[in-house]
Image (tube, rainbow, N blue to C red):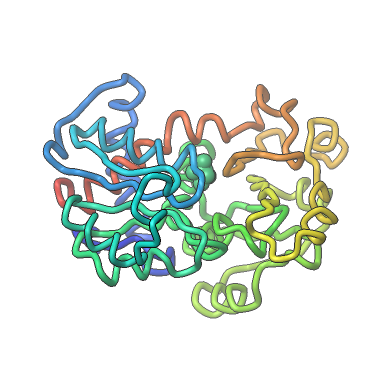
């Protein structure tokens, strides 16, 4: 499928072939990025980054990708000093920005906000996170990193541990893992399990193998361990957040006791809390720095260039 002019709203709108096409284009940008190069593929194009919620990696990542391809960006981090602060209707503001930009990247606390933006915007809309629902470009980054670090995705044991209910990164990544025939190992408190609807869809549509495990078992079995943090913004009940926060804490000692494979890779969307100890940062298990420092920007460059139609 051509990505030209396409909104990126939900991972289920893509196929494995789409992922592979984006990976192939990103391959061409990795060395450009690493060598701090520059290519005028998107000269004259404007990206609007509308972040109603905080972000470091996604917002700056798309902005850096746009600049590296010769385009530019406008936008905000938080609505202070925009007319939303004066009560502007959500879609009115989007209609205005749509007239100023070639592509829109949006993050919002409400489920469906990116979809609502896409309904009124002519420019393609990239969902950079809508509440607990989706963050559909993140699995492109994560699966590309797995492919680069492990050489493949098919057949890997991918363990996801932590909040599997409210984290949109998880609700996005599981679809991508399913498309690549990974075995999903799930570890969570009973209150924070993957939704039944998603589980049903993954099994019916992708025939994915899903196994529930305890933390030690999962770590011993995993080729890739994905730690999902608990974020207060994704909990309706504060008491529940404070009760469950800190349920899991993975450090080097825990990995050794659990019998982690020597070539286990750990990924984390960041920012981290106590579920990921800094003592893993400088070990071969750590894949999260490499993910953001080497592979996230080339993927975002590929997505922008493909959606804006300068690369097929
Ligand atoms: N992983 C991620 O979405 O990071 P940011 O919140 O910093 O964008």
Q: Image height check: is 160 above or below 117?
A: above
Q: Residue most toward the right?
A: 257
Figure quadrant of residue 296: top left
Q: Is residue 68 left or right of residue 174?
A: left
Q: Position of residue 110 (x, y in %)?
A: 50, 65
Q: Position of residue 282 (x, y in %)?
A: 66, 22
Q: Residue most toward the front?
A: 86
Camera sees residue 226: yes
Count the labels in the image: 0
Q: Position of residue 311 (x, y in %)?
A: 17, 46
Rendered-image quadrant of the N terminus: bottom left
Who is closer to the viewer here, 310 or 247?
247
Q: Position of residue 163 (x, y in %)?
A: 70, 57
Q: Residue at x 58, y 73 (%)?
A: 198
Who is closer to the viewer here, 101 or 291?
101
Q: Residue most toward the top?
A: 35
Q: Residue at x 33, y 58 (%)?
A: 18
Q: Image height check: is 215 above or below 197?
A: above
Q: Residue at x 66, y 26 (%)?
A: 281
Q: Is residue 141 left or right of residue 69?
A: right
Figure quadrant of residue 268: top right
Q: Residue at x 46, y 29 (%)?
A: 293
Q: Is residue 118 left or right of residue 60?
A: left
Camera sees residue 15: no
């Amino acid at each position: 499928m051509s990505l030209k002019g396409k909104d990126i709203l939900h991972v289920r709108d893509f196929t494995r072939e789409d992922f592979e096409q984006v990976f192939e284009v990103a391959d061409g940008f990795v060395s450009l990025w690493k060598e701090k190069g520059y290519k005028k593929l998107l000269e004259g194009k404007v990206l609007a980054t509308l972040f109603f919620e905080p972000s470091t990696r996604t917002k700056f990542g798309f902005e850096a990708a746009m600049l590296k391809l010769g385009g530019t960006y406008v936008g905000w981090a938080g609505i202070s000093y925009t007319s939303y602060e004066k009560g502007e209707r959500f879609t009115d503001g989007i209609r205005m920005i749509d007239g100023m930009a070639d592509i829109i990247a949006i993050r919002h606390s409400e489920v469906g906000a990116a979809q609502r933006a896409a309904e009124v915007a002519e420019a393609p809309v990239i969902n950079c996170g809508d509440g607990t629902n989706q963050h559909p470009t993140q699995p492109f980054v994560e699966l590309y990193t797995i492919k680069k670090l492990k050489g493949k995705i098919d057949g890997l044991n991918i363990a996801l541990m932590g909040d599997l209910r409210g984290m949109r990164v998880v609700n996005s990544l599981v679809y991508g893992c399913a498309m690549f025939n990974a075995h999903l190992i799930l570890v969570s408190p009973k209150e924070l399990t993957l939704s039944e609807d998603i589980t049903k869809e993954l099994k019916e549509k992708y025939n994915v193998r899903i196994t529930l495990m305890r933390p030690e078992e999962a770590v011993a079995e995993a080729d890739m361990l994905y730690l999902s943090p608990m974020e207060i913004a994704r909990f309706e009940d504060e008491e529940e957040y404070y009760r469950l926060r800190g349920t899991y804490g993975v450090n080097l000692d825990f990995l050794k006791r659990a019998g982690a494979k020597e070539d286990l890779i750990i990924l984390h969307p960041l920012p981290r809390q106590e579920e990921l100890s800094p003592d893993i940062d400088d070990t071969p298990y750590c894949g999260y720095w490499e993910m953001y420092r080497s592979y996230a920007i080339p993927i975002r460059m590929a997505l922008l260039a493909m959606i804006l139609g300068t690369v097929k």
